[in-house]
Image (cartoon, helix red, strand yellow):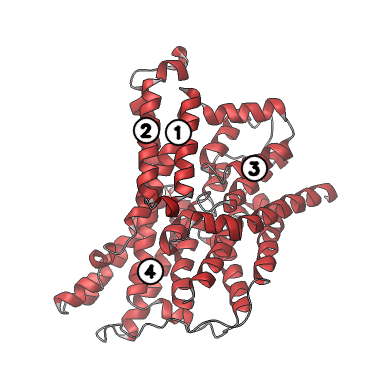
Amino acid sequence: MYLLIIVIFVLGYSAIAFEHSLRIDKAAIALLTAVTLWTLLVLGIDTLIPSNEMEPHFIDENLMHHLGEIAGILFFLIGAMTLVEIVDAHGGFEVITAKIKTTKKVKLLWILSILTFFMSAALDNLTTSIIMAALLRKLLSDKKDLWLFAGMIIIAANAGGAWSPIGDVTTIMLWIGEQVTASNIVLKLFLPSLVCMLIPLALISSKLKGELAKVKVSHNLNKSITEKEKKIVMYIGIGALLFVPIFKSLTHLPPFMGILLGLSIVWITTEIMHRGKEEHIKREFSIVGVLRKIDTPSILFFLGILLAVSVLQVSGHLSDLASLLDAKIGNIWVINSLIGVFSSVVDNVPLVAGAIGMYDLNTYPQDHTFWELLAFCAGTGGSILIIGSAAGVAIMGTLKINFIWYVKNISLYAFIGYAAGILTFLLINTIF
């Protein structure tokens, strides 16, 4: 059963990779893989879990535990996507796109990538990628350019999230667990993260030539939406997203609570704003209307892939992998580098959780090189594959990017940036 779970996971992952060839939606494959793996776990529980570790309702408790964590991510994703869509519905992003005057592809790519890098550190990589995906749809009409820009945005979002204590789920875990301090993670990882972004940015820029195709401009915005209303929704919507990390720091509640708070405020604001207007206008510019535009298949894909990975955690596959790395390799540089590569295949959260479980603060004290490198590798390694990070999955769903296209056109650049970031970190530690 142990090997069968690995085989089914690999088959499911392969089917997702070849979604377009099979002509079966990746969400359906992910859900089938998840349910199949949990079923196998139940059937083989006696051989997979030692009896002394077994408790009554072991499966139920573990399934609900992981489902609770996944639900937090999904509700955050739904809330963030809804906020971005409501701002977009009111033409709010036109206020931003109007400020971007350049028509040169390379210049625009650099502007958006650097903006993403710093936004991701202030917000987080998932929220930033959702916002940037909406901007890309407004700025680019050519599909090839759109996907190339999106690939670079994924790299920039993950690199930006790695050097901030609130930029990525894994850095948040290490920060809360006191493996790293906020000031130290910024100090030690900013330059490696910047290099991790700049190298792929320079390489991808070399593939871009000429000027932008005609920018998409919305001309069908209902005249009943005034300029004042457009700006109010934009400022409140973006403000709600920016407030999430502040809310988390103040209350210590999970991020999805902050996003739901922001969503409720925007919802009430738009209801009041449009309550005197005709029904079809209220429907088009209300949260209820916008919710119909949310990419539900991407939400279900996220649910399936995270549930599938959770089986590998419960069954001990990931902890066995961590133990194997420790026993066979032992070198913290190689171990963390491999964890980053593995995080492009499976979720980085259980990998980091496994590392935290294996090494306590007596082995590696706070702000040790091991924890710093783990934060960098787990945060940026997911860019190597499009489904290796929350930012990648969100953009994949929003812009319908093909998995194989990403492997052919972006993965190598992401890996080169990842390796360059590790070497930069090594160089800094050698010198200082």
Q: Which residue is pictured at 58% across the width and 26% down the height?
A: 320
Compared with residue 65, is residue 29 higher up or lower down, i.e. above or below? below
Which residue does the numbered mark 3 point to in the structure image? Answer: 374
Q: What residue is at 81 percent from the left and 51 percent from the top? A: 427
Tell me the number on the disc at residue 8: 1
* Label 2–label 1 contact, CB within 8 A: yes
- What amino acid type is highlighted by mark number 3? Leu
Residue 336 % position (x, y): 67, 40
Left or right of 194 in this view: 87: left
**Residue that numbered label 2 is attached to:** 36
Q: Which mark is residue 174?
A: none
In this rendering, the answer to whether 41 lies above or below 127 is above
Q: Residues within 10 Å of mark 2 (few under 14, many from 20)?
A: some
Dividing the picture into quarters, in which one does residue 281 lie? bottom left
Extreme residue toward the front, this view? 21
Q: Nearer the viewer, mark 3 or mark 2?
A: 2
Mark before the other along the chain sequence, 2 or 1: 1
Q: Residues within 10 Å of mark 1 (few under 14, many from 20)?
A: some
- x, y percent for residue 216: 43, 81
The reply to whether residue 143 is in sight is yes
Quarter of the image for the N terminus: give it. top left
Sort mark 4 into few (<14), some (14-19) or many (20+) by Cα contacts within 10 Å: many
Residue indicated by mark 4: 237
Instruction: Give the number of marks.
Output: 4
| In this rendering, position of residue 106 left or right of residue 119 | right
Which mark is nearer the camera, 1 or 3? 1
Q: Secondary structure at mark 4?
A: helix
Q: Are marks 3 and 2 in contact (CB under 8 Å)?
A: no
